[in-house]
Amino acid sequence: MKLWGGRFAKATDALVEVFTASIGFDRRLYRQDIQGSIAHTKMLVRQGILSPTEGEKIIAGLQEIAGEIERGQFTFTAAREDIHMHIEARLQEKIGPVAGKIHTARSRNDQVATDLHLYVKEETAAVLALIAELQGTILHLAEKHLGVIMPGYTHLQRAQPILFSHHLLAYFEMLERDWQRFRDCARRADSSPLGAGALAGTSFPIDRHYTASQMGFSSCYRNSVDAVSDRDFVLEFLAAAAILMQHLSRFCEELILWSSQEFAFIELDDAFTTGSSIMPQKKNPDVPELIRGKTGRVYGNLIALLTTMKGLPLAYNKDLQEDKEPLFDTVDTIKNCLTIFAPLLASLEVKEETMERAAAEGFANATDAADYLAKKGVPFREAHRVVGNIVRYCLEEEKGLADLTLEEFRRFSPVFGMDITGVIQTKSVVAARESYGGTAAGQVERALKEGWELLAQKQEKPGP
Ligand code: ARG
């Protein structure tokens, strides 16, 4: 007999049972479901809707059920549809008809929304900690290789030399925004829908603020229809996750490029790479490739739920059951990716000399030769043209800018003086970029210091 079976003259078709069941995935919410039910029961007792003895029986039964599930002694079946029905039906087996009182002034609609809010809050806290850990790894790496110069790229063409640490710290900043986004998302999830009932509220004298505070929520939904219809907090989590994966994926793409023989800027640790079944020489960057690849499913999960939500009339519709699998998959995926990324980064070998050699080649100092002329009063456009001509000359002569004599420079402009040689050294080129947020050592050291300060603040005040 179904818990809702009273109105039905026929048994549910077996196909329907299997088709509508969510127990295969929503069993993951059992802890949150029991937590919500305990808070609800306490409130019912407090408000005189249940007797204290009834409340005690229900709560003791719920706690036993939590233990059974944890020990793997709980039977799941499609006939009981979802986690809410499973727990209530089991409670009935354990304590008899009084179990039926637990659903007073409650609907599965506000129940499932409550479970999901608790779940998103918890998982967001876990994700925030993992992001902060990865940020710490980046700061360590940047600190370890402070002073190492690499070519900075635009269009994947060598552009201007920068500190390797400066490049790494760009990822620190991206992750900082991710951290802020998840924290923001946790704030919105921090609101209790419990007590909204099916959609309209309830005629029982409940206390929604009490249940909210029992579950650790700092507020309640103001509108009962909104409370059971809203999945914005899930969408926000999925959107924050999609942007996070975009960042990890770009970082991975660079690690893959840099570890190719063509770049050879880094070498990934043996423990974080894999071999080929046919080519004995191969050492493949499977881990960054997989992170890059998994970005697709995380984007897909966001689009899936956005599409499910589009056009849903208020309030609850069974379509909303489709919110869970994308959310769970994204939670697992981003936690796995963040967890493996930190030790992967911490263990990589940086080939400092190859990077510096690459930075010295490819005319990455050409802007500085033009800036030199501009600082001596030549309009920048003119300076740009002059240096462009010099680069063409160098290409013909197979020389770098730093190989030219003063006499050669002067053939292109009489403004060049002895000091040009110092200005276009790779080290001077980097050191000169002292503008706020630039790549000069002083700026990068400040960014590092501020990065550590940001992380320390998170330690003091983690979570949302
Ligand atoms: N399994 C359902 C879900 O995930 C729980 C809510 C069911 N509510 C209902 N009115 N059928 O959304």
Image (cartoon, rainbow, N blue to C red):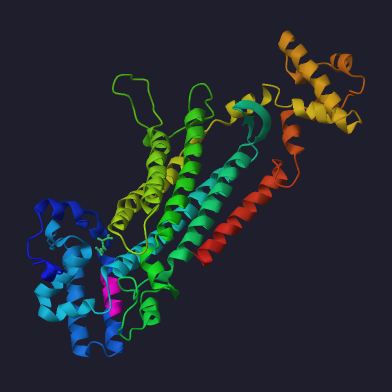
Q: Residue at x 52, y 29 (%)?
A: 258
Point out the residue furthest to the top here. 396
Image quadrant in which you'd find residue 393: top right
Q: Which residues are magenta?
A: 34-40
The residue nearer to you, when weighing 109 against 326, is: 109
Q: Position of residue 301 (x, y in %)?
A: 37, 46
Tell me the quadrant of the picture where the N terminus can be found.
bottom left
The image shows residue 417, relative to residue 445, as above or below, that is above
**On the picture, is 11 further left or further right than 124?**
left
Determine the quadrant in which ligand 1 lies: bottom left
Image quadrant in which you'd find residue 274: top left
Magenta residue check for 37: yes
The answer to whether residue 463 of the structure is visible from this angle is no
Q: Position of residue 424 (x, y in %)?
A: 77, 27
Q: Residue at x 40, y 39 (%)?
A: 296
Magenta residue check for 125: no
The residue nearer to you, when weighing 113 against 159, is: 113
**On the picture, is 391 further left or further right than 17?**
right
Q: Position of residue 192 (x, y in %)?
A: 39, 72
The answer to whether residue 428 of the structure is visible from this angle is yes
